[in-house]
Structures are given as structure tokens and as C-alpha cells.
Amino acid sequence: MGYQKKEKIKNKNKIFKYISLNKIFNKQDISENLNLSFPTVTKYIEEFLEQNIIEEIGIKNSKHNRPSITYKFNPNSLYSIGIKLEVNRVSFIIINILGETLRKNEIHNNFYNNPNFAKYIVQQLKIFLQGFEEQDKLIGIGISLPGIVDDTFKKFEIGTNFQIFSQDMKFIEEEMKLPIFLMNEANAAIFGEYILNNFTYKNLAFISIDTGIGAGIVLNNKIYEGDNFKAGEIGHISIVPDGGRECTCGNSGCFERYCSNTALINDFKENFDLEIHTLNDIFFNNLHTTPIGEEILKKYTKYLAQAIQTFLLIFDLNKVIIGGEICFYKDYFNLEENLKNLVFNNLFCKDKNILEFSKYGESSNLIGAGLAPFRNWS
């Protein structure tokens, strides 16, 4: 039974991918191109018709010159909501089946040690949805969280940077009358990248650099979460074991204490007598071009390379994607070239094409969260 269920989901996914890429099609096209039986194709075509994911556009001759009912893909038949929670802000997005953005907003707020953040999210989400006239097409809410989540019981288990532990998220589901899908932020990001880029890599990872650092890992075409959903918590691997900076997790010398956005901002704060709150404050004021700024960024790149190289040696990946706000500033201090020179400098790490920066910057996990309600057939 389990095998049959997996095969059905696999076939549905294949058909959905085909129709979303080809836009206009008929059953015979799908059957021949995907090597699926005509009854199987018919079953899912009928299901997609009921959901208005596709619509009939008439009878046309097929490539075999036989009359055939032709269909058109309708990406705006259904929508979903994506939410990205960080320590100091929350972002909202509405997307269609293809991940195209209809509406987006970002609100700055401090969620550190705030047990009522779920109520705040609901309040702001209701405001965000005001004036959106197609709420009846919304099928669910995906939520990206920086920490360990339990989607089965809808709990945010551990968010060390928030000082939030085991928070129930079902309140959002009950208030909004929509199912919620919880994802670790890095897993949301790798999911978004995988779908939007139509990747064919079997083994890849997304390193999310934000207020903390995490990694979403795909092994053999499946997101790897580990037995206790802790896989990818690379931000808490110690890279400075002796006398390193203390971390909120209880250890010292953790990766994210040196390479997260928060860490980089704090390094510049400590060395410059200026108001520095964002990465933009650093680069807009050209602090990166000063001798002190150059030294800070040199150490930053060194630590980042050290962690990435370790990661590659453990997992032997086809692709590693760096994501986060730092992507927007990589050309300011030649980060990409310097990072690749440090990572790919030995017998085991030689192919520089393995590493790239996300073209979606810090939005991958937000879009990935929005795609989560569609994940059974995207």
C-alpha cells in the first residue's frame, strides 16, 4: 500500500510538472512523453480540472492528426501564503502555484523571548490580506522558522536566537481557518530553490545566512531532516573551539557567531563609532573599504569558507547555494571569488562551479514557505 501511494504521488507530480512547463497540452501528449497509461493521465487530468488548475480550451488535432481535447494550465487557480519569521522582522507573501508573487510585505518587530508572537502574526496577517479579493482561492499557509520545528504537531520546538522553546503554532491555523505547514528556514529555502530553478541535482544544500545560520539539505532528491529534525543546524558547529564567542545554544565558537548577519553587524559596531543596524549601513557608508573593514571581511570570508569546505567534505554535494541578504553585497568586497579560492583549494574540493549565490537573495525561504501548501504536487 505504501509503495502504491508513493507511485501515485510520483505520477501526479510528474504530470503537474509537465503541464506547468508546457502550458497547453492534451492527454496523449502527457501519456507519450511521461510513459504513463492513458487511464492514469485521465484520472489526474480530471482531478486538476475539478481544482481549476487546468481548463479546456477546445478540440484540436494532435500531432497524430487526430481530434483531441486540449487543455491550458491555469497558475492563478490557487494561491498560498508564505510567512518568514526572524528575530527582528516578519515577512508575508501571497504566491500562485508557480511561485509568482502577487503581494508582499515586511514588518519590523522584536520577537526575542516573546511567547505571544503567534497572535501578533495572525493580527498582521489579517491586515496584510485586507483588500485581497481572492481569499477563497487560498489553500494554506507555509511558515519559515529559524530553528527546529515539528510540523506533525505544529510546534516551533527550538529557536535559540529567539530564546523561544516549544511554542504551539496551531493558533494560527485555527484563527485563519487554513492549514499551516511549518518548515525550518533553510529547508524552506532549499525547497523554494529546487522548485523555482527546476534543479536536477540529486545532492545539494542551501546555506541560509540570516540572523542565524542553517542549511537545507537534499540527498537523493529528498529533503533530509534527520530523525529529530535537527539536520542542517550548521550554525552551531564550533569553528573556534578554544576561547570562541559564547552562543545562545550553550556552546562557544559557533559558526553563526562569526558569519551570521548579526555577527557581521556587531563586528563593525565594535570597530566604528557609528550607528550600524543593518548590512546596508556597512556597505552604503563604505566601511568595507577601510583597512579595519577589509580585515573584518577577510576573517568573515575565511570562517565562511572553512564551514563550507567541511560541509562539502561530509556530504560530497553536486551544488551548494549561499542565500541571505549577504547575496546583495557579494560584489562589494569580491566575496564570491575570494570564497571560492579558499573553499576549492585542495584535492577533495576542486570544482568551483559547485558553489553559487542565490539569485533570490533572502527571499528563497519566504517563497519556499509559500510553496509548501503545494508540495504534494509541485
Image: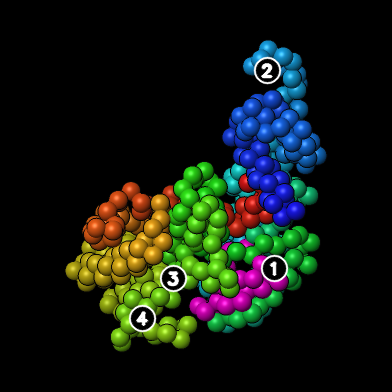
Is residue 257 in the magenta section?
no
Question: Which numbered mark, 2 or 4, is in the foreground of this view?
Answer: 2
> Which residue does the numbered mark 2 point to in the structure image?
62
Residue at left offset 64%, top offset 71%:
150
Residue type highlighted by circle 2:
Ser
Badge 4 marks a residue whose secondary structure is: loop
Q: Earlier in the sequence, mark 2 or mark 3?
A: 2
How many numbered dots are placed on residues in this image? 4
Residue at left offset 73%, top offset 30%:
38
> Which residue does the numbered mark 1 point to in the structure image?
152
Measure the C-alpha gap from mark 2 to mark 3. 52 Å
Q: Earlier in the sequence, mark 1 or mark 3?
A: 1
Badge 1 marks a residue whose secondary structure is: loop
Residue type highlighted by circle 1:
Thr
The dot on residue 234 is 3
Measure the C-alpha gap from mark 1 to mark 3. 23 Å
The dot on residue 253 is 4
Residue nearest the observer in this picture, 370 or 305: 305
Q: Earlier in the sequence, mark 2 or mark 4?
A: 2
Q: What percent of the width, then of the height, locates residue 331?
A: 30, 53
Residue nearest the observer in this picture, 186 or 361: 186
Measure the C-alpha gap from mark 1 to mark 4. 33 Å
Q: What percent of the width, then of the height, locates residue 244?
A: 33, 83
Q: Earlier in the sequence, mark 2 or mark 1?
A: 2
Q: What percent of the width, then of the height, locates residue 114?
A: 61, 80
Residue type highlighted by circle 3:
Ile
Badge 2 marks a residue whose secondary structure is: loop
Measure the C-alpha gap from mark 2 to mark 1. 45 Å
